[in-house]
């Protein structure tokens, strides 16, 4: 709903200082002018922008033959590209990284949104979760009703924005970070991402910031470890030549 990649100039320059060609990609934000913008449409924009990114780099004298993709506000979109769209990518996706992006949409995890994540609420098959249904609709663009939660039918409707559902044994190596007290996307949802990476044998590092919420603001030492791990994975899977 907000932000601009111009705000990422510092970290893009930091990656450049390590020898990497970088690009920050904007996407259409939800607003009165763009009421149809949602996570799925944004993910399609990211996919469609890649040929332009590669072409522009070529014009500047940089031949792109492999890539990594990551983000913070765009972390959900980065994961969708890395896990869902990588087979169609112009260049191989060697790894993905990011923080706090929602990766899956199981109603039992999202019941806790806005509440204490360490005191999970039980799923009531007869409960009224229309608010969650409306949120999932706003993010996926697919109609979801409260009754669909009772049957599990809703899972097909959120598949187009669920990076966790796209993970398989060929998924890109992954470095992620989440705050234990995150109430924006609920922290519990990130545990299913971790489980999917583990069960598919993906090389991954999962950082749980035990004192932080969505901003990862209270675990500076672990955040520094997270950033170092990103560089370690880049050195392993995309070494600068």
Image: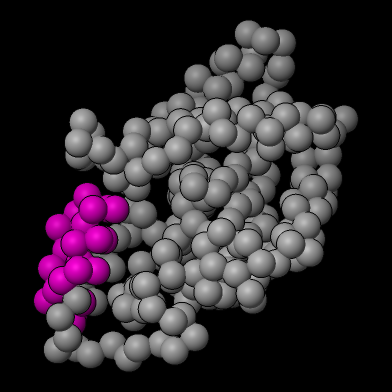
Q: Is residue 170 visible?
A: no
Q: Is 111 located above or below residue 92 in the figure?
A: below
The location of residue 109, given as percent across then percent down, is: 38, 77
The location of residue 169, given as percent across then percent down, is: 59, 62
In the image, what residue occupies the spot 25% across and 61% down?
135
Residue 179 covered by magenta stretch: no
The location of residue 41, given as percent across then percent down, is: 31, 40
Q: Is 2 located above or below residue 114 in the figure?
A: above
The location of residue 51, given as percent across then percent down, is: 50, 23
- Say which of 210 and 64 sits in front: 210
Q: Can residue 161 be seen in this view?
A: yes
Would you say 162 lies left or right of 70 here? left
Q: Is 61 located above or below residue 202 in the figure?
A: above
> Could you say which quadrant of the image residue 145 lies in?
bottom left
- Say which of 167 and 134 sits in front: 134
Count of numbered badges drawn on the protein: 0
Tell me the quadrant of the picture where the C terminus can be found. Answer: top right
Would you say 115 lies left or right of 23 here? left
Would you say 187 lies left or right of 208 here? left
In the image, what residue occupies the spot 42% across and 29% down?
48
- Residue lying at the far right in this picture: please name it: 241
Residue span colored magenta = 130-151
Q: Is 56 located above or below residue 66 in the figure?
A: above
Magenta: main secondary structure: helix
Tell me the quadrant of the picture where the N terminus can be found. Answer: top left
């Amino acid at each position: 709903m907000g932000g601009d990649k111009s705000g990422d100039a510092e970290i893009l320059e930091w990656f450049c200082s390590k020898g990497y060609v970088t690009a920050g990609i904007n996407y259409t934000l939800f607003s009165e002018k763009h009421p149809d913008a949602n996570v799925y449409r944004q993910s399609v924009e990211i996919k469609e922008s890649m040929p332009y990114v590669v072409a522009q780099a070529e014009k500047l004298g940089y031949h792109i033959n492999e890539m990594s993709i990551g983000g913070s506000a765009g972390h959900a979109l980065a994961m969708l590209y890395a896990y869902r769209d990588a087979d169609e990518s112009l260049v191989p996706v060697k790894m993905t990284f990011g923080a706090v992006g929602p990766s899956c949409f199981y109603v039992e995890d999202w019941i806790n949104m806005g509440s204490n994540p360490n005191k999970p609420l039980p799923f009531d098959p007869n409960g009224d979760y229309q608010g969650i249904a409306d949120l999932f609709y706003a993010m996926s663009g697919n109609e979801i009703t409260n009754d669909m939660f009772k049957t599990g039918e809703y899972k097909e409707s959120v598949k187009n924005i669920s990076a966790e559902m796209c993970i398989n044994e060929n998924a890109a190596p992954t470095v992620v970070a989440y705050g234990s007290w995150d109430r924006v996307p609920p922290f519990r949802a990130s545990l299913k991402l971790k489980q999917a990476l583990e069960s598919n044998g993906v090389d991954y590092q999962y950082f749980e910031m035990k004192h932080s919420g969505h901003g990862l603001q209270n675990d500076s030492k672990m955040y520094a470890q997270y950033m170092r791990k990103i560089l370690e994975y880049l050195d392993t899977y995309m070494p600068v030549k």
